[in-house]
């Protein structure tokens, strides 16, 4: 059973751990110790900030660690709870999945109180941390498997009041692109559990990989700070893209299964258009070259519909069924937030 010495009702700043029992060959009574920081002062929303849902995604882990060191109670109106490396065993191993139980944190919800380590963490979020939160921020990137245009993203939830708050928080990240996505690869996602509890859920896909450009770190850390100001939990007015002299965020959506292009066979993937490029329906996006039969023509990957290339597969070596690209069509904010039906 997960244990923490943190008192979530207490004002001020606390630094501690979520402790999950994990008995192994060299540690019979050992705990996995997941760092957690809470900073609370006065009246305001409770915002839960999560990085490292996947252990090989570093942008949110770094932004979370820096924010946890920086924040003082004087800076906060309400409560900020930060877990920089949620799947801590995976973060230590630089892997997407937990090396302890092989589980994907983002398929583990709602979790089990007496399940494996990943499942116990999910259960604690579902039953303790989500219920006390107004907002859940889950910072992802593509890890080692995908490279995204740095974007904030969300599910198009049905509750219109919740959807409007999620749309405005998504846009407060001030990214060039925003992305409305669908779950084509399984259930048990962290954001879905938080959405079902009625929370304002803010998620991102900030690039990918391990060679993270400084600009992407700036987008992660600047966007997070601006969203917290937008939510009122940090003092100071949020800035808009207009104030920064930037064009409006391009909102895109990939809600159909065919928007997610899967490799029809294995081989070496070549991308033919740059991330963030607007492509036409039927346009060639890339090729899969046949490792064992280079004399055969490569398999062509074609866009089903028009839209922006928002993400591409990162490793060139590709297995049949891997997602190699996602094409997301531009969409008006007014058609999403109910202001135009
Ligand atoms: Ca991820």
Image: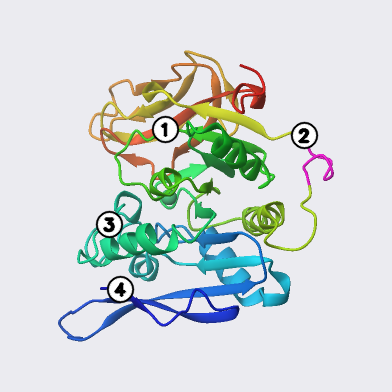
Residue 275 visible in rendering: no
* Labels 3 and 1: the sequence-earlier one: 3
- Is 79 placed left or right of 154 in the picture? right
Do residues under tags 3 and 4 come within 8 Å of each other at their CB atoms?
A: no
Separation of disc 3 and disc 2 at Cα? 41 Å
Q: Quadrant of the N terminus?
A: bottom left
The image quarter containing residue 77 is bottom right
Query: Which mark lies nearer to you, 1 or 4?
Result: 4
Query: Which mark lies nearer to you, 4 or 2?
Result: 4
Q: Residues within 10 Å of mark 3 (few under 14, many from 20)?
A: many
Separation of disc 2 and disc 1 at Cα? 26 Å
Q: In front: 245, or 240? A: 240
Instruction: Tell me: is circle 1 under 8 Å from ligand 1.
Output: no
Q: Residues within 10 Å of mark 4 (few under 14, many from 20)?
A: some
Which residue lies under the disc numbered 1? Answer: 182
Under circle 2, the secondary element is loop
Which residue lies under the disc numbered 3? Answer: 111
Which residue lies under the disc numbered 4? Answer: 2
Q: Residue 247: which disc?
A: 2
Q: In front: 8, or 316? A: 8
Q: Does 244 appear in magenta?
A: yes
What is the magenta segment's predominant secondary structure?
loop
* Residue at x 27%, y 33% (from the top left corner): 321
* Labels 4 and 2: the sequence-earlier one: 4
* Labels 3 and 2: the sequence-earlier one: 3
Separation of disc 4 and disc 2 at Cα? 46 Å
Separation of disc 1 and disc 4 at Cα? 31 Å
Stretch in magenta? 240-247
* Labels 2 and 1: the sequence-earlier one: 1
Query: Which mark lies nearer to you, 3 or 2?
Result: 3
């Amino acid at each position: 059973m997960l244990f923490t010495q943190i008192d979530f009702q207490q004002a001020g700043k606390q630094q501690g751990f979520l402790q999950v029992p994990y008995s192994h060959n060299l540690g019979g009574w050992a705990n996995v110790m997941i760092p957690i920081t809470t900073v609370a002062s006065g009246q305001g929303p409770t915002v839960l900030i999560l990085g490292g849902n996947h252990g090989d995604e570093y942008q949110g882990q770094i932004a979370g660690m820096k924010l946890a060191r920086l924040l003082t109670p004087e800076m906060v109106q309400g409560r900020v709870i930060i877990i920089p490396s949620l799947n801590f065993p995976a973060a230590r191993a630089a892997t997407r999945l937990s090396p302890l139980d092989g589980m994907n944190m983002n398929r583990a919800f709602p979790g089990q109180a007496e399940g494996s380590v990943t499942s116990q963490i999910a259960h604690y979020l579902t039953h303790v941390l989500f219920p006390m939160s107004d907002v859940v921020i889950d910072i992802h990137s593509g890890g080692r498997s995908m490279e995204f245009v740095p974007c904030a993203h969300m599910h198009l939830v049905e509750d219109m009041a919740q959807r409007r708050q999620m749309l405005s928080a998504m846009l407060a990240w001030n990214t060039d692109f925003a992305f409305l996505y669908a779950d084509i690869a399984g259930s048990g996602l962290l954001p879905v559990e938080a959405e079902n509890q009625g929370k304002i859920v803010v998620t991102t896909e900030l690039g990918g990989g391990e060679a993270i450009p400084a600009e992407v770190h700036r987008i992660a850390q600047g966007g997070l700070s601006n969203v917290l100001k937008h939510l009122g939990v940090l003092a100071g007015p949020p800035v808009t893209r207009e104030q920064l002299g930037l064009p409006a965020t391009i909102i895109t959506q990939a809600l159909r299964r065919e928007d997610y292009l899967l490799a029809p066979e294995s081989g070496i993937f070549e991308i033919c258009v740059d991330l963030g490029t607007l492509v036409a329906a039927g346009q060639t996006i890339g090729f899969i070259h046949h490792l064992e039969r280079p004399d055969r023509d490569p398999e062509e990957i074609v866009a089903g519909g028009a839209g922006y290339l928002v993400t591409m597969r990162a490793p060139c070596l590709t297995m049949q069924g891997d997602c190699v690209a996602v094409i997301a069509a531009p969409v008006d904010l007014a058609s999403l937030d109910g202001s135009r039906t």
